[in-house]
Structure formats: structure tokens, C-alpha cells
Amino acid sequence: MSHRRIELRVETGALEDGRSWTLAATVHLPDRPGPSAPVVFAMPGGGYTRHYFDLREDGYSEAVHHIARGAVVVAIDHLRVGDSDVPELEAASLAACAAANHAALQAILKDLHEGTLADGIAPIEPAAVVGVGQSMGGHIGLLMQAGHKSFDGLAMLGSSVVSTRLPARDEADAVCLRGHADPMAGLSALVGFDFQYAFHWEDVPARFVDADMAGQRGSGPLPYWRSATTPNAGGGLLPGHLAGAAATVTVPVLLGMGERDVCQDPLRELAAFMSTSDLALFVGPKMAHMHNFAGTREALWRRLDAFVAQVADRA
């Protein structure tokens, strides 16, 4: 379908720490968005950019899928990601990224509401704003909701709040921080880890896998969906670090993950969201951690469509 992309540089204004930043975002719209089109705010994982949600090959753009069903998709580069500002690592904690993202989202929603986003776009008053965060993006989305009430619904995809565990072909090589006397020291196990098994199911085309893993290892050109820099995400990997934030969320929550993913125990993940009365789980078959490359990616996208519609109806 026809697809309009609007590239933005969004100023956050002064945040609580007195700093201000500029974030890069892409707003994806259908030709004629409805006056109450829901907004999907898409947040990439560590080492990835907003282009993960708009892979440039037929059938691989999640953004195209959602706008075909009437949504507006806003994909963001976090602090220290892609085309956004790249401050020193200490300034780009997950909480700082959440505050910057929230400010950028509010600025974009204001432009949508006032019809000032771009020429030819009529005002839009979204029926709902749904956060969709993959991996580390889910952690940041969770902190946006816990600290800023950014969304009417939150989908966390391949994003553990209990204990991140990276699967490996040999079970003995899997990396799990739960049980480490010093979980931060356990992060060193990720150095030299073979991410291909954890990130990509066996049927993912080699052109994607080879480029993605070369970017991961730094052994080849960085593909456009990869970022050379990342936020300071270490704390989000620590067991239980985000459980307190999860316990405060009252909006509808969808936990989505692949059959082979970083969430060790889906039922324990669900239990962390003790304050919401609307909680769902989706496990994508034949899908590893990087869902949008999977042959079964559309099953997850359709589940997200249903979740967005459900949140909009409730809102």
C-alpha cells in the first residue's frame, strides 16, 4: 500500500536533570489516516535502530503492516541510538532514555493533534497510544509507563522483567544472570557469545542473518537497522531490576516473545504485572529473539493489531 514516511528531529526540551536532547523519529502514515487513528510508538532493542520496524524488503516492514490496518506508527531512536544525540554513556541510562522518549512522544502527539506534523496531514486525535518495545525497547517502554504514564497500553516483546536468559545451541552455553552472586560480573559472559542461535530462527534468509551478525560482531559493515552505539542498558538485564516498575503498570499489557527467546519463564513474567487487570501472553512459533526477521513474523504483527484495537476500544 501507499506509505508516507515523515522523518523528524524532535527536541525534548529540558528534562528533570536539566539536560535537553534531540531524538530521531520516523512517523509512518497511510495516505488518509483516520481522525482518531491509534498511534503505535515503536522502540527498538539494544544495538538496533528505528529502521528495525521498517525493513526494506517486501513483507518485512512491520510499520507497513500496521498502517495498512489504520494505525499511525512512530518509530524512535533512543538516546545514543542511530540518528539521535549520542551523549556519554552515563547520561543515557534506561530511565534517561524513558524521559527523553516521553518528551519526544508528547511533542509528536501535539503536532498530530494540531495538524502541524507536515503539510497535507489533517489533525489526528488518537483513539489510543500503544507502546511497543522490543527487547531493551520494552524495558524503556516499561519505564516510560511506570514513570510518565505515556501509554494506554504496553506491548513488551522479547523483553524480560524477571531474568534475561540468552539461549544457546548447547544448553550448557546459555547465559542467565539469575543465580550469579554478582550479576554485573555475569554480563561478561556475553563477550564472545554466539548470538545467531538466540536471535534468528533457522529459516531466516542468510542475507539478513549474515548482515545482522556481522554488525553484532563488528566484523562487517553496519546494516541500516543496526546502531553502533547503545544506551546504558546493563541494569535492565539484572534479575528483578524492573519488577518494581512492572508491578505499578495498570494499563493493558501484552507480553510477546518467540519460541526461542530471552524470557526464561513466561508465567513468571506475567506474574510481575500484578496491578493490571488486562494481561496477555503470545509466543510466536518458529521465532527467535529478533522477531521481525522470522518467517512467522506476521503472526506476531496480527496479535499486535488485535491488541491495539482492544486498547483503542477500551480507551
Image (spheres, grey):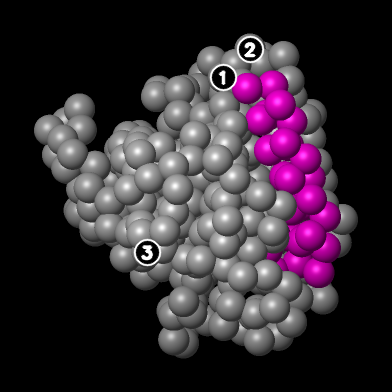
Which residue is denoted by mark 2 in the rendering? 275
Which residue is denoted by mark 3 in the rendering? 7
- Please give left or right for residue 42 compared with residue 304 in the image: left
* Viewer-side residue, 267 vs 290: 290
Q: Amino acid at mark 2?
A: Ser
Q: How far across and down, in percent of the image, does residue 5 sit?
A: 47, 66
Q: Which mark is residue 249?
A: 1
Discs 2, 1 touching: Cβ within 8 Å = yes
Q: Amino acid at mark 3?
A: Glu
Mark positioned earlier in the residue sequence (2 or 1)? 1
Q: How far across and down, in percent of the image, does residue 167 sit?
A: 71, 56
Query: What separation in Å lies between label 2 and label 1 (alpha carbons)?
Result: 6 Å
Which quarter of the rendered picture does the C terminus lie within? top right
What range is drawn magenta here? Answer: 288-315
Query: What separation in Å lies between label 1 and label 3 (alpha carbons)?
Result: 31 Å
Question: Residue 169: in sight, yes or no?
Answer: no
Discs 1, 3 touching: Cβ within 8 Å = no
Farthest residue, direction left: 18
